[in-house]
Amino acid sequence: MADLPKTLDIVAPFFNEAPSASAFAELLAGLEAAVAGRFGLTVHKILVDDGSRDDGATRFAQALSGSWEVVRLSRNFGKEVAVLAGLDQSRGDMVLIMDSDLQHSMDISLKLIAELVQNPDIDVVYAQNDRREASWRRSQLARLFYSLINSSQRFDIPENAGDFRVMRGAVARALTSLRDKRRFNKGLFAWAGFRQKALPYSPEGRASGTSKWSRLNLIAFSLEGFTSFSVIPLRLISLSGLLAAFAGALYGAKVFFEVVFYGIAVPGYPSLLVAVVLFGGLNLTLLGLIGEYVWVTLSESKDRPVYIVRDVVRSGIAVRTTPGPSDA
C-alpha cells in the first residue's frame, strides 16, 4: 500500500495583485486549517511574484501566516514561467496550483485534494472550467482550437483545463524537468501523461482588477500552443496552397479550351491581378507561419535560463539568491 501524503505545497503565481493580497492570504489560512483537519496534511505556501509593479509581494509577506515563501522574479516572465518557478521550489508530497485573484475557491480546492487523497491510482486532478459565462462564439472558437491542436497527437489536451490542479510530488518533479523556454502549460501537463481526472467547476468572480488576458493575448497564447505542440497550421497552409494550385490548373484548362475551341480572348489584367494577390497572400502567410516556428526553435536553442530569481522572502527576511540549476 502506498504511503499516505503528509505535506501539501500550494503554488500561486501573482502579478500586480496587491489589492487582493489580504483576502487571498485569508483564503490560504482557511484552506490550510481545513486541509490539516480533514486530511492531516502540513501546508507550505509558495507564492511567485512575476515581476509585479506594485507592492503585492510586501503585502503578501505581511498577511501570510504559517509556513510560506514569496519568490520574486527579476522581471515579468509570464504566468506559465511563474508556475514553473513555484514548482521548482516545491518539495511536498502533493502540490496544488491555484491563482491568487480569488477565482479559485477553497471549496473546489478541497474537492481536488480529496479526490487525489482518496484515489491512490490517480496522479493528477485538474479543474475543468464549465464556461457557463462564455459567449456562444467564444465557446465555438475554443472547441475549434482544441479539435485542431489535438488532431494527429498521441495525447489530448483537455478542453478548458488550466493550471488549477493538484498533483502528486512525483508529477511535479517530472514537470520541472521540462525546461521549455516558450511554455504552454496546458500542453506540457498533457504531454507529461500520468493518470489524470477532471473535476468540473465554475470560477469565482475576480476580487479586484480586470483579467490580464486581452483578445490579442489569447490569440498569441493560442499561437504559442500551436507552434509548441502541433504541425496542423503548416499542413492547413500547405493544403490551401495545393487547392489554390489545383484551382489555377482548372482555370488554365478553361482558358485554353475557350481560346482553342471558341476563340475567346484571354482576359488579361483582372485575371493576372487575382492570381498575383492570391498566391502572394498564400506565400506571405506561409512565410509568416514558418517564421513563428523558426522563432520557437531559436528561443529553445539559446542557452538562457527559463527565469531569474531576484530574491526569496521567508518570514519577512529576504534571502538573496543567484540563478542555479533549478533556473536553467
Image (cartoon, helix red, strand yellow):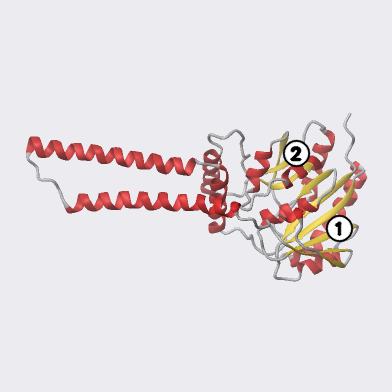
In the rendered view, tell whether residue 137 sits above or below residue 157. Answer: below
Q: Residue type at mark 1?
A: Trp
Q: Residue type at mark 2?
A: Val
- Which quarter of the figure is the N terminus placed in? top right
Q: Secondary structure at mark 1?
A: strand
Q: Front-most of 266 and 88?
A: 88
Q: Residue at x 64, y 55 (%)?
A: 303
Q: Residues within 10 Å of mark 2 (few under 14, many from 20)?
A: many
Percent across and percent down for residue 88 are: 77, 52
Q: Residue at x 73, y 64 (%)?
A: 17
> Which residue, given by chain and number where applicable, does mark 1 sit on?
68
Q: Which residue is farthest bottom?
A: 54
Percent across and percent down for residue 81 are: 68, 55
Q: Secondary structure at mark 2?
A: strand
Q: Is residue 102 visible?
A: no
Q: Is residue 210 left or right of residue 104?
A: left
Q: Residue at x 64, y 45 (%)?
A: 186
> Which residue, given by chain and number where applicable, does mark 2 sit on?
124
In the rendered view, tell whether residue 126 sits above or below residue 300. Answer: above
In the rendered view, tell whether residue 250 sits above or below residue 26. Answer: above
Percent across and percent down for residue 51 are: 70, 65
Q: Is residue 221 visible?
A: yes
